[in-house]
Image (cartoon, helix red, strand yellow):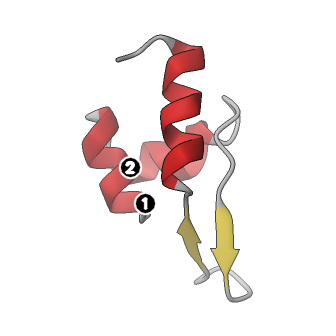
Amino acid sequence: MSTFEVATMLNMSTSWVYREASKLGLKGYKLGRGRSAKVLYKRAEVFKWLEQQKIH
């Protein structure tokens, strides 16, 4: 899943996902190097994280 899809699912902004989600335990995978690298998330891990957070 892209960062935009995760943000839409959580009803948050993309900047929140970039800044805060990793602090709360949602692990992203970078494609590329440097500041402009894209961050993707595995769908199963997002749903597992949601279960742990009890946001759903």
In this rendering, would 35 be left or right of 11?
right
- Amino acid marked by disc 2: Val
Which residue is pictured at 54% across the width and 53% down the height? Answer: 18
How many numbered discs?
A: 2
Percent across and percent down for residue 14 are 38, 53
**Quadrant of the rendered image containing residue 21:** top right
- Label 2: few (<14), some (14–19) or many (≥20) C-alpha neighbours in 10 Å: many
- Which residue is painted at 48% across and 46% down in the image? 17
Residue 45, above or below 31: above
Disc number placed over residue 55 in the picture, else none: none
User: Marks 2 and 1: CB-CB under 8 Å?
Assistant: yes
Task: Classify 50 as above or below 10.
Answer: above
Rendered-image quadrant of the C terminus: top left
Query: Which residue carries the number 1 mark?
Result: 3
Front residue of this view, candidates 23 and 8: 8
Residue under label 2, please give it: 6
Q: In the figure, is residue 48 to the left or right of 55?
A: right
Image coords of residue 50 (percent x, y): 49, 26
Question: Which quadrant of the view contains residue 22?
Answer: top right
**Label 1 is placed on what type of residue?**
Thr
Sort mark 1 into few (<14), some (14-19) or many (20+) by Cα contacts within 10 Å. Answer: some
**Percent position (x, y) of residue 30?**
67, 73
Distance from disc 2 to disc 1, alpha carbons, whole Å, reads: 5 Å
| Left or right, residue 14 beside residue 20 | left
Q: Secondary structure at mark 2?
A: helix
